[in-house]
Amino acid sequence: MINTDDILETIHMIDDENLDVRTITMGISLLDCIDSDIDKACDKIYDKICNYAGNLVKTGEDISKEYGIPIINKRVSVTPISMVAAACPGKNPVRFALALDRAAKAIGVNFIGGYSALVQKGFAPGDYAVIQSIPEALSRTDLVCSSVNVGTTKAGINMDAVAKMGHIILDTAKATADRNCIGPAKLVVFCNAPEDNPFMAGAFQGPGEPDCEINVGVSGPGVVRTAIKKAGDCDIAEVANIVKKTAFKVTRMGQLVAQEASKRLCVPFGIVDLSLAPTPAVGDSVAHILEEMGLESCGAHGTTACLALLNDAVKKGGIMASSHVGGLSGAFIPVTEDAGMIDAARCGSLSITKLEAMTAVCSVGLDMIAIPGDVPPEIISAIIADEAAIGLVNSKTTAVRLIPAIGKKAGDEISFGGLLGGGPVMEVNRYSPLRFISRGGRFPAPLQSLKN
């Protein structure tokens, strides 16, 4: 029986607390599009995406209208392009990026992810060419997102790839310097990348996934903050309980949307990603949840503890509301995409060092952080190595999405617009890690990888 109070509560969450479904993402396998003729392969890719996802946007809009639930983004993720490019040695893989961009524009989605390579244990055919081409691919396309997985708990960390990605991120920023260096905002470096993540820029359709599926990412930081505020000065166990109950309600809405989209598109339902994904809008901030718990400002001592509680409670509450939970599932802390994080970075309470500590207990990593444009590539690589090491030893996903702001210094401002937001350029430790990064090789897998 439908409870009237539950209906009214959900309406209030949507109208006043920024509750939404952040994305419906259709994952599409391109393995059957592989062809030694790159022109034929690109045509197959374009045709398959348009055929499978042609009604994705309309379906999302129809569900949104019928149920009154805002669905912010409709996206597509595809098989890592390095696997497709392996069949076309000597050809420029940017042609695949252009085909993806054309298809994304034809079907009207916000982003398409999967210009990716999985190199945690070394470079297979196609991997190096795709990685090398990322700056050109992201500068010549509008909707394509890219990711590179450099490590897993099982395999260790490919330090040659880590060293390479410092240069690639910097080169991508330079290639898009005329557009506020937006290229690196569409590029993520992962450790333990999930194969079913619906969130950009790191979404791709992993090789273990089906031919096509629907994955949904929910959100609702504003709803969680309001629930904690209403509770007043309760103890910390009650705070956790409130977050669990709220996460259950938010995820239940995501499950409804996922099942409805799956039915209408005749595509299997994959997972619901529980992540609390913030936006630059006031009242839609993960940082503000932490401050509602009792911090004067996000970044103060106690921030990591508050985030650990939030992340754990979100998972515990959300997993009861969905038959299949996956992706990243937790709390995101992207600096330029979170109004509270932006304010904390501006006032100096939030530093990259503190953000790194926070990534040990949240669902991703150092996300959407603008750094000075003159930071050398080996420092970027060392930041990646630190984050990958946190993921490696904790058997969790970590990631880095840094934006070198070409021509800007610490304290300057940069803006990307939309959900990508904007904010201050943050300083980094300038002491050199060059000798460490230059060693290369493979960082050994930790002892906890030996579970068989």
Image (cartoon, grey):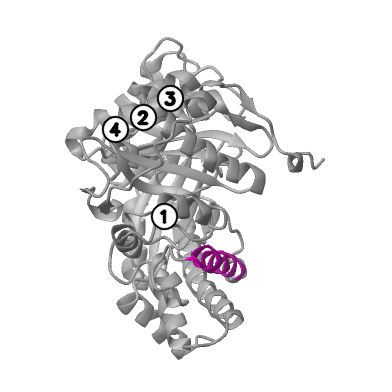
Residue 385 as seen in the image, left or right of residue 445: left
Which of the 4 image quadrants contains residue 419?
Answer: bottom left
Q: Determine the residue positioned at 38% across, 43% down.
A: 428
Q: CA distance from mark 3 to mark 2?
A: 19 Å
Q: Are marks 4 and 2 in contact (CB under 8 Å)?
A: yes
Which residue type does callout 2 highlight? Answer: Pro
Above or below, 233 against 281 in this view is below
Q: Is residue 306 magenta?
A: yes
Residue 422 % position (x, y): 26, 52
Earlier sequence position, callout 3 versus callout 1 = 1
Q: Name the residue beneath numbered marker 2.
A: 376
Residue for badge 4 = 374
In the image, 213 versus 326, the foreground residue is: 326
Between 298 and 66, the one nearer to me in the picture: 298
Magenta range:
301-316
Task: Identify the mark nearer the N-term, 3 or 2.
Answer: 3
Taking the image as shown, residue 411 lies to the left or right of residue 319, namely left
Q: Which corner quadrant holds the C terminus?
A: top right
**Tag 1: amino acid:** Ile
- Give how far apart the Cα atoms at labels 3 and 1 are: 27 Å
From the image, tell me which residue sits under label 1.
24
